[in-house]
Image (cartoon, rainbow, N blue to C red):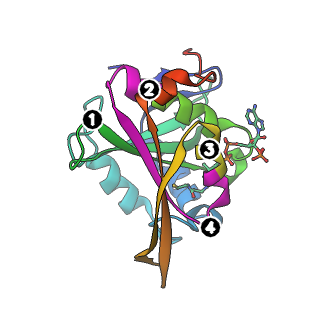
């Protein structure tokens, strides 16, 4: 197994039951949940079920998700998580989603984690394309995805009904060839 993936400031490896208190605490934060599929009612049972459903393989099988914890490598503190989804309708294509606890935002941690996971998917998993989908109003994630070299591929207007309203989603993507051209590839720890 390649985990933990290391960067200068982070260790990234599958979420475990030991992460549950910190994971639930930030999922219950209304600011963090604003553009996500869960809300402040997210609880320990939800987290238990999520962790119990996780694959024990390096990558999810086709159609599945793998939830990776983003941790402080020194003391194991959970900063946030990054999820990998193997799209079943497209060969060698993965979707990612990233969340940080509010106290760990605006430190460049998401950028560092996403770059490392992209590097992992394109080198170790031989991915062809990685995508990310976000509400068009979610400015921090738009900034993040652009900063790591992803580009907006498409916009689907009012495509999903979430939290009482129709939402418009932007889809971002990066190809293996595009990452290899990027000057900012994160050094492995
Ligand atoms: C999306 C999300 C992960 C982005 O987190 P973030 O902390 O804003 O992103 P980054 O790690 O890239 O941090 C970037 C900021 O840190 C600053 N920063 C501070 N120290 C830094 C460092 N050492 N290196 C790089 N950037 C640093 C940058 O300047 C940048 O600020 P700016 O945008 O004002 O220029 C976060 O907003 C989040 O968890 N939101 C809730 C969940 C969510 O909506 N997820 C998206 C679902 S698709």
Q: Is there any visible trace of residue 186 in the rendered image?
A: yes
Secondary structure beneath dot 1 equals loop
> What x and y, as percent, mark residue 17?
40, 43
Which residue is pictured at 62% across the width and 62% down the height? Answer: 138
Instruction: Tell me the distance, in whole angstroms, between the alpha carbons under discs 4 and 3.
Output: 14 Å
Q: Earlier in the sequence, mark 4 or mark 2?
A: 4
Image quadrant holding the C terminus, namely top right
The region drawn magenta spans 119-142
**Count of number-bearing discs:** 4
Instruction: Tell me the distance, in whole angstroms, between the alpha carbons under discs 1 and 4.
Output: 29 Å
Q: Which residue is mark 2?
A: 177
> What x and y, as percent, mark residue 76?
56, 31
Label 1 close to label 4 by CB (< 8 Å) = no
Instruction: Tell me the distance, in whole angstroms, between the alpha carbons under discs 1 and 3.
Output: 22 Å
Q: Is residue 27 left or right of residue 130?
A: right
Q: Which mark is residue 146?
A: 3
Q: Which mark is residue 137?
A: 4
Q: Nearer the viewer, mark 2 or mark 3?
A: 2
- Which image quarter has ligand 1? top right
Label 1 close to label 3 by CB (< 8 Å) = no
Q: Which mark is residue 92?
A: 1
Image quadrant holding the N terminus, namely top left
């Amino acid at each position: 197994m390649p985990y933990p993936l290391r960067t200068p400031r982070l260790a990234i490896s599958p979420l475990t039951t030991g992460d549950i208190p910190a994971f639930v605490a930030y999922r219950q934060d209304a600011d963090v949940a604003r553009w996500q599929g869960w809300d402040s009612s997210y609880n320990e049972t939800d987290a238990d079920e999520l962790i119990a459903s996780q694959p024990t393989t390096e990558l999810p099988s086709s159609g599945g998700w793998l939830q990776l914890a983003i941790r402080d490598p020194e003391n194991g503190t959970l900063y946030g998580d990054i999820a990998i989804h193997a799209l079943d309708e497209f060969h060698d294509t993965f979707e990612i989603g990233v969340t940080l606890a509010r106290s760990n935002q605006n430190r460049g941690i998401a950028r560092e984690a996403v770059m490392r996971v992209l590097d992992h998917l394109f080198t170790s998993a031989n991915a062809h394309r990685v995508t990310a989908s976000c509400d068009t109003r979610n400015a921090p994630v738009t900034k993040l995805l652009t900063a790591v070299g992803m580009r907006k591929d498409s916009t689907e207007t009012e495509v999903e009904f979430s939290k009482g309203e129709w939402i418009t989603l932007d889809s971002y993507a990066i190809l293996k060839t595009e990452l290899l051209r990027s000057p900012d590839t994160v050094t492995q720890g």
